Structure formats: structure tokens, C-alpha cells
Image: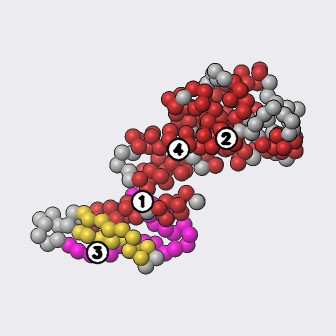
Amino acid sequence: MLGDVVDEARLDELEERLGVRFKDRSLLRLALTHSSYLNENPDAELESNERLEFLGDAVLDAAIGHRLFHEVPEAPEGELTAIRSHVVRERALAAAAGRLGLGDFLTLGRGEAANGGRDRPSIAADAFEAVAGAVMEDQGYEVVSSFVLRCLEPELAAALNAESSKDPKSLLQERVQADGSPPPEYRLLAEDEHDEAGRFTVEVVVSGVSVARGVGRRKLDAERIAARRALELPSLIDSAEAE
């Protein structure tokens, strides 16, 4: 039945897939309840999963951020933020929800279900966040962190592999040119002739504006440091997350 509430036997099956046994199963039921069901059934004694979705969003950021903090200790804040944005974006969360088969367990309005709502990426991603919020509320941070990392391991590995294969200059060029801007330029500002190994100061220029500087024993090192610092700028981070 398209709009029916999930029964207890089906919740047993879902808990098996999640690898989590809920103490308060009403939280899991709440995580599966889409607002479209309540729109069609205003007298139902249920709420939608939107508040749990809010909690799950925060949990995902914390769990993935904590993992990245230890996984890539040399990465600056901007790079960590960019990697995390790829792991917690809608496409990744919908993929995780698909592997769990969450769509089959959602309580949707009949109209939404008939129009393919169970396969809609936005609904699947929101449901995954809501389930994470429910696990957090029922089991605590350690359990939900393990759940999130287990479910998003493929996306996390792919994001780490993609980022680790590029140096900061390549990453910066991708971010800058994503909106059609010309590639960054690197200008040598100074070379310390009194340093036996040499010491270079370089600035990176984006769209005619100097955005960051770097100092290194080699010119290339200085350019990479300047690129890393540019990647930490909020405007560049926001651009990367909007992709």
C-alpha cells in the first residue's frame, strides 16, 4: 500500500540493514515519516522527520569532520571542508540511502509515493539524515558516528582519493575555474639571497586580485603554500560546496 505506515515486521528488517537496534523504535518510525504523509493525513498522531533531519545534518558534519581531522592531518581547514562537502552532499547521502533501501520503508503521502517519491534523491538524502538523527537520539554519538562512517565509507574513500591525487595548485585552479574565471596566477615577490637554500615569497592572484601569499625554500613550495591559504578563503570554500 502506497501510503501505509511501516509495520513492526518491516522495522525489524530495517534495523537489520542499519545494524542498529533501537531502544525507542518510535524514533525510527519518526525518521521515516515524510511531510507529504501528514499533509494527506492531518489527523494522524505523527510528526514529520524534519527535526530529526536537522539533527542528522549536524551529526554527519561532526562524524565526517572528526574522521577527516585524523585521516588527513596535514590538510588545512579549506581542504577539509571541501572533502567533507563531497561526502555529505545530496548525491552521496542518496547513494547511502539507496544501499540501505530506505526508500522502501518511508511513510509517504500516496500522491508522493505514486509520483516516484521513494526514488527521489532529495527525499532519500533527507531520510538518511533523519535516520542518523534518530540513531544519535537513541544511541548517542559513538554509535551514530560508527553508523555514519560505515554507511558513507565508499563516498569518503572516493573523496579522499580524489583530493589526495591533486596538489593545492591543482585544487585551487579547479575551484577558480569552476565558474569560468581564468586560472590563478603566481607572482614572485621576493627572493632572500642571504638564505643558503634560498627563500621565495610568492603571491597568488585570482581574477586580478592578490588573495594569499606563501613563503618557501623553493618557488614551487611557496606557490603551493599560497594555494593552500587561498583554498581556506570562505568565498572559495562556498564556491566549492555549491558545485
4 or 2: mark nearer the eye: 2
For the N terminus, give its image quadrant: top right
Q: Residue at x 46, y 66 (%)?
A: 173
Give the labeled residue for mark 4.
61
Secondary structure under the numbered disc 1 in the rendered image: loop
Across and down, in percent, residue 136 comes to 58, 32
C-alpha separation, residue under disc 1 versus residue under disc 4:
18 Å
- The reply, left or right, for residue 19 in relation to residue 197 is right
Q: Residue at x 74, y 39 (%)?
A: 48
- Which mark sits nearer the N-terminus, 4 or 3? 4
Q: Hey, what amino acid is under mark 3?
A: Leu
**Amino acid type at image mark 1:** Glu
Amino acid type at circle 2 is: Arg
Q: Earlier in the sequence, mark 2 or mark 1?
A: 2
Give the distance between the C-alpha atoms of the residues marked 4 and 2, in whole angstroms: 16 Å
The answer to whether residue 73 is left or right of residue 54 is left
Question: Which mark, by number, is residue 51?
Answer: 2
Q: Which quadrant of the view contains residue 118?
A: top right
Mark 3–mark 2 distance (CA, rounded to whole Å): 52 Å
Residue 217 lies, in percent from the top left, at 21, 63
Question: Which of the two labelled residues, at mark 1 and mark 3, occupies the earlier sequence position?
Answer: 3
- Going from N to C along the chain, the mark reached first, 4 or 2, is 2
Query: Label 1: which residue?
Result: 232
Q: Residues within 10 Å of mark 1 (few under 14, many from 20)?
A: some
Residue under pointer 3? 188
Check the image and report above or below for 132 versus 82: above
Which quadrant does the C terminus fall into?
Answer: bottom right
Is 117 within the magenta? Answer: no
The colour scheme used to paint the residues is secondary structure
Crowd class of label 3 (few under 14; some 14 to 19; many from 20; radius 10 Å): some
Residue drawn at 39 percent across, 70 percent down:
211
